[in-house]
Amino acid sequence: MPCSVQRHQLRHQWQLKFAVSAPCSYLIYITEHQIQFKLEPEPEPEPEPEPEPERNPMLFDSFSVPSLHLSNRTVMSPMTRNRAVVANTPNAMMAEYYAQRASAGLIITEGTSPSPNGLGYPRIPGLFNAAQVQGWKSVTDAVHAKGGKIFIQLMHTGRVSNVVSLPPGAEVVGPVSDICPGEVYTDVNGMQPYSLPRAMAALDIATAVEEYAQSARLAIEAGFDGVELHAANGYLIEQFLNANVNTRTDDFGGSINGRNRFALEVVRATVAAIGAERVGIRLSPYGVFNSTGTYPDQEAQYLAFTQALSEMKILYLHVLDHAAMGAPPVPAAFKTSLRNAFKGVFILAGGFDLASAETALAENRADLIAFGRPFISNPDLVERMRTGKPLTEPDQTTFYVPGATGYTDYPSFATT
Ligand SMILES: Cc1cc2nc3c(=O)[nH]c(=O)nc-3n(C[C@H](O)[C@H](O)[C@H](O)COP(=O)(O)O)c2cc1C
């Protein structure tokens, strides 16, 4: 019966252990006075460790595609801050602001005009001359020195503009000569009606397309990791996309293909200038900002547009839902259709917090999640979310005013 015997001498007793084939063994205790038999069950074998379940990518995981490595999956949304006080040129304070936020996986800068004609708000930066290249270089250097990645958002305001904000010689242009309803802030005269745009002729369109491409080249010269084309929120590219604004009847309007044409020409020219792997685009279907709004063909049009973008193999598609700011929500099914139609990196933005961002990533609804307002008042947003620290609320009264207050003076948690 026994197949092995172990012998241990305890202080006043001998212990002989007979291993048997059953999962138990006999213990025989021999002491000076007695011999005892005891049946002792073998300890249960340790269970094999479960293999780690495959985890969905989460917000603090790194993210890599061949052209870009991000230390985490948060994106700082593009946000206009109106601090380019001298000649629409980035300055040292802007470099400090972006460097403070360099722990975002990817920073996308505030909307920046590729043309003097696109500077429709006071103190927004441009990127079309040598001084602006130098100014932006100080920003990209500061962000890169802290290990961050940064794209510039190219935003041409088009008809969302008042002429007094433009530099001398520039003019307000748009797809048609219809004034944008409402008023816009100017430094010179306070709130003013929008200026009447001049409808862009074929030559103006070709010029604008080349301005985007040239600005993208300058962006690379200034050290950016890439460029985001702003095709959202009712600025020039969306003015062409949106059927409520673009009532042209020529090749740049009148149909899905016609309305998509200007945007696709801008993308094509930008891709030719700097390479598809460095180009992203931002869209806001269902948006109402700057008097856009939805229309019957909108989903079909945006799907056709997205398919074309996918074929051009641009780096990312950034879809914005302003429901958290009071706009109609973008239907979830439509966001899924856009994600499925686009083979590159997919970013979702609008109203996210840590929990909803993690859920969106876990459900594979996006690759990266963009946060806007939380980054204004929490320069260390990523660390705060990672360690469960409370977030500071932003002060809306300082969003668009010059100066450091409400801009570079939000402390990180460690120093509060
Ligand atoms: C002060 C401010 C400025 C903004 N400027 C821009 C801009 O220049 N370009 C843009 O695409 N979106 C702009 N947005 C929209 C944000 O990028 C973002 O989509 C929006 O704030 C919703 O995201 P959130 O809920 O995370 O803040 C701005 C938003 C704010 C609050």
Image (tube, rainbow, N blue to C red):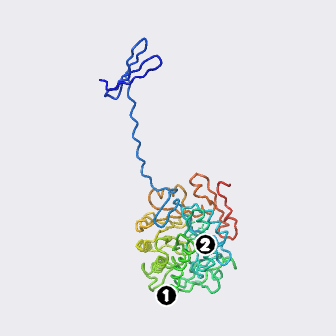
**Which mark identifies residue 137?**
2
Q: Position of residue 101 (x, y in %)?
A: 61, 62
Decide if residue 61 is in sight here: yes
Q: Position of residue 141 (x, y in %)?
A: 60, 68
Image quarter (top left, top right, bottom left or bottom right) of the N terminus? top left
User: Residue 336 lies in what quarter of the image?
Assistant: bottom left
118 left or right of 4 in image: right
Most extreme residue toward the top is: 33
In this view, 303 is above or below 2: below
Within 10 Å of disc 2 (Cα), the crowding (few <14, some 14-19, many 20+) is: many
Label 2 near ligand 1 (CB < 8 Å):
no
> Three-letter amino acid code at disc 1?
Ala
Label 1, label 2: how far apart the Cα atoms are: 33 Å
User: Residue 324 lies in what quarter of the image?
Assistant: bottom right
Q: Position of residue 114 (x, y in %)?
A: 56, 78
- Asked whether disc 1 touches disc 2, contact meaning CB atoms under 8 Å apart, the reply is no
**Which mark identifies residue 11?**
none
In the structure shown, which secondary structural element does the residue marked by tag 2 occupy?
helix
189 left or right of 44 in image: right
Tally of numbered discs:
2
In the structure shown, which secondary structural element does the residue marked by tag 1 occupy?
helix
Of the four image quadrants, the one with ligand 1 is bottom right
What residue appears at the point 65 percent right and 72 percent down from the top-left corner?
A: 82
In primary-sequence order, the first of circles 1 and 2 is 2
Name the residue nearer the viewer: 83 or 140: 140
Q: Which residue is mark 1?
A: 202
Marks 1, 2: nearer the viewer: 2
Q: Position of residue 75 (x, y in %)?
A: 54, 63
Within 10 Å of disc 1 (Cα), the crowding (few <14, some 14-19, many 20+) is: few
> Three-letter amino acid code at disc 2?
Lys
Name the residue nearer the viewer: 228 or 230: 228
